[in-house]
C-alpha cells in the first residue's frame, strides 16, 4: 500500500482574475507565481504560493457562476490555511481592515494536526476559506 504525504496544490476556477489575485496576494499575503507569464499569455494560469510545498492555481473560466451560488460556490466547499497562534488576532484585524467579514469563529475544529482554533471567511468570488492555528 502507498501513503500520500502532502498536498501539492488546489485549483480554483476564477471569473474575475484581477480581483481574486488582489485578494490572495494583498489580503492573504500569498506570493504570486507565474503572474507576469500569465499576463503575457505565456502560461494558461497564475498561482499563489502557500509554502515551499503547496500552491493554489487560479484557473480562469469564461462563464460566470449562477447568481444563486451564495454563500458558497459549487466548485469547492472550502480550503484551510494555517498560521502561528500569535498571529491570529492581527490576521483577524487585517481581514476587517480589508472589509472581509469573518463568517464563523473563532471556534475549535479538527484538522490535519488535531484540534485547532479557526475562522471562516470568503474570497471575492464566494469561496469559503478557513484559517487556523494549532496549540501544539
Image (spheres, rainbow, N blue to C red):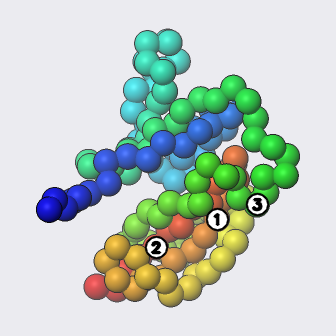
Question: Do the residues under discs 3 and 1 have CB atoms within 8 angstroms?
Answer: no
Counting residues from the start of the chain, the first of labels 3 and 1 encountered is 3
Q: Mark 2 points at which residue?
A: 132
Task: Classify 41 as above or below 8.
Answer: above
Question: In this orientation, which residue lies closer to the viewer: 66 or 96?
Answer: 66
- Specify few, some or many for label 1: CA neighbours under 10 Å numbering under 14, 14-19, or 20 or more: some
Label 1 element class:
strand
Q: Distance between the residues labelled 1 and 2?
A: 12 Å
Label 3 element class:
loop
Q: Is any part of residue 93 visible from this angle?
A: no
Horizontal arrangement in the rendering, residue 78 relative to residue 42 (left or right): right
Question: In this orientation, which residue lies closer to the viewer: 6 or 33?
Answer: 6
Horizontal arrangement in the rendering, residue 28 relative to residue 95 (left or right): left
Q: Name the residue under label 1.
A: 121
Counting residues from the start of the chain, the first of labels 1 and 2 encountered is 1
Foreground tag (3 vs 2)? 3
- Specify few, some or many for label 2: CA neighbours under 10 Å numbering under 14, 14-19, or 20 or more: many
| Number of the label disc, if any, that sits on residue 71 | 3
Q: How far apart are marks 3 and 2 (CA)?
A: 21 Å
* Image-quadrant location for residue 77: bottom right
Tell me which residue sits at (52%, 18%) in the image: 39
Amino acid at each position: 500500500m502507498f501513503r500520500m504525504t502532502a498536498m501539492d496544490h488546489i485549483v480554483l476556477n476564477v471569473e474575475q482574475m484581477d480581483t481574486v489575485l488582489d485578494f490572495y496576494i494583498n489580503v492573504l499575503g500569498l506570493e504570486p507565481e507565474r503572474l507576469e507569464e500569465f499576463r503575457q499569455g505565456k502560461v494558461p494560469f497564475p498561482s499563489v504560493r502557500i509554502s515551499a510545498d503547496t500552491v493554489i492555481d487560479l484557473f480562469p473560466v469564461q462563464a460566470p457562476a449562477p447568481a444563486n451560488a451564495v454563500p458558497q460556490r459549487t466548485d469547492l466547499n472550502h480550503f484551510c490555511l494555517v498560521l502561528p497562534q500569535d498571529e491570529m488576532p492581527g490576521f483577524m484585524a487585517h481581514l476587517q481592515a480589508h472589509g472581509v467579514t469573518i463568517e464563523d469563529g473563532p471556534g475549535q475544529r479538527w484538522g490535519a494536526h488535531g484540534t485547532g482554533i479557526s475562522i471562516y471567511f470568503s474570497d471575492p468570488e464566494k469561496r469559503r476559506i478557513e484559517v487556523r492555528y494549532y496549540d501544539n
